[in-house]
Image: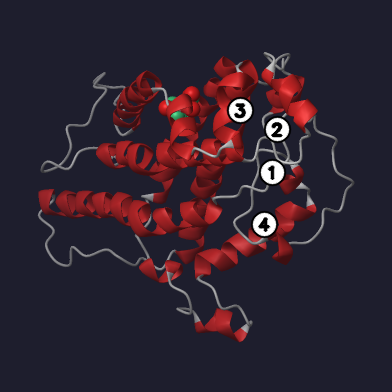
Amino acid sequence: MQSNYTISEDPLSLDRIRSVLVRLEDTIIFGLIERAQFAHNPKIYQRGAFKELKELGFEGSWLEWFLKETETFHSKARRYTSPDEYPFTPASDLPEPLLAPISFPKILFPNTINVNPSILSFYNRAIVPRICRHATLQLAANKRAKGITGDDEFEDDGNYGSAATLDIEVLQAISKRVHYGKFVSESKFSSSPSSFIPHIRKPNPAALDALITKPEVEQKLLQRLRKKAATYARDMNLETEETHSPGINGVPGKIDVEGVVDLYESYIIPLTKEVEVEYLLHRLDGLTEEQIEELGKGKSR
Ligand SMILES: O=C(O)C(=O)C[C@]1(C(=O)O)C=C[C@@H](O)C=C1
């Protein structure tokens, strides 16, 4: 939960919401750099790959088990009562919070959107293999540069606990980022309800998508992201004041910069938009004709 979220004077200010999205870019890039320090370890994403889990009666993957155990604890500490926190484990498998819920200001319209299954799927399928492959290539190039020959494959280093712990950090950051789309959507809706209402009443997802899409914001984001990822991928050398590492045998830096850009372009932004549209499609659920008419008369805030 953002500490500034409840105290902010205008929690629906689009600038404020976007500043959270910008900060989460750093969290995601650093998380990926940390994850890439370990091998891909494909076994941890495969259901049934660990007989030890089966013996416990758990049918999912190692990562799903890690998620369930971690989220069980976090759920007791009421993490998922916060409107910007969503578990990957089905809510029915998680315990109730130990403490009474905090009463958060009602900023979002009540909804049940949780796209974490999609996040988990693209992360396992496309993101981890790509960023770890980059790290493996770098390691191999490093070895060759030192004249060490031999096995270049470095798929499984046995660090299943470390890899899953870091996966969870990245997944939670991506999840928060994507579900922040609800705040973006509420902000856009409340600044001009009448533009949205007709496309919600006669559901037109394509029209809603066109209303929330801001190509110039996306372009700037991708440029900024490429710059940040390229900067964080470098090693700073204080002695020579060199601020870049040229890379080894054409494999530069600590992170696959284009992989990070592709993560946003192909997955994070499209899924955030899906959340925004889905949120809007349900934005009038349960409201009376009078309430909708009132909303449509102007700005609701
Ligand atoms: O900043 C916004 O207005 C958003 O809706 C967020 C976001 C994004 O995911 O970064 C998504 C859609 C817009 O086209 C621009 C950016």
Asked if 63 appears above or below 55 in the picture, the reply is above
The image shows residue 105 at horizontal and vertical percentages of: 80, 29
The residue wearing badge 4 is 71
For image coordinates 58% across by 68% down, the residue present is: 65
Q: Is residue 25 visible?
A: no
Of label 4 and label 1, which has the lower sequence position? 4
Of label 3 and label 1, which has the lower sequence position? 1
Label placed on residue 133: none
Q: For the residues carrying marks 3 and 1, which lies nearer the camera in this image?
A: 3
Foreground of the two, 283 or 31: 283
Q: For the residues carrying marks 3 and 4, which lies nearer the camera in this image?
A: 3
The reply to whether the C-beta atoms of the residues labelled 3 and 4 are less than 8 Å apart is no
Q: CA distance from mark 1 to mark 2?
A: 8 Å
Q: Image quadrant for the C terminus?
A: top right
Q: Image quadrant for the N terminus?
A: top right
The residue wearing badge 2 is 108
Of label 4 and label 2, which has the lower sequence position? 4
Q: CA distance from mark 3 to mark 1?
A: 17 Å
Asked if 282 appears above or below 222 in the picture, the reply is below
The image shows residue 254 at horizontal and vertical percentages of: 30, 40
Pointer 2 local density, CA inside 10 Å: few below 14, some 14–19, many at least 20: some
Q: Secondary structure at mark 1?
A: loop
The residue wearing badge 1 is 111
The residue wearing badge 3 is 197
The reply to whether the C-beta atoms of the residues labelled 1 and 2 are less than 8 Å apart is yes
At label 1, the amino acid type is Asn
The image shows residue 261 at horizontal and vertical percentages of: 31, 36
At label 3, the amino acid type is Ile
Residue 240 in which image quadrant: top left
Pointer 3 local density, CA inside 10 Å: few below 14, some 14–19, many at least 20: many
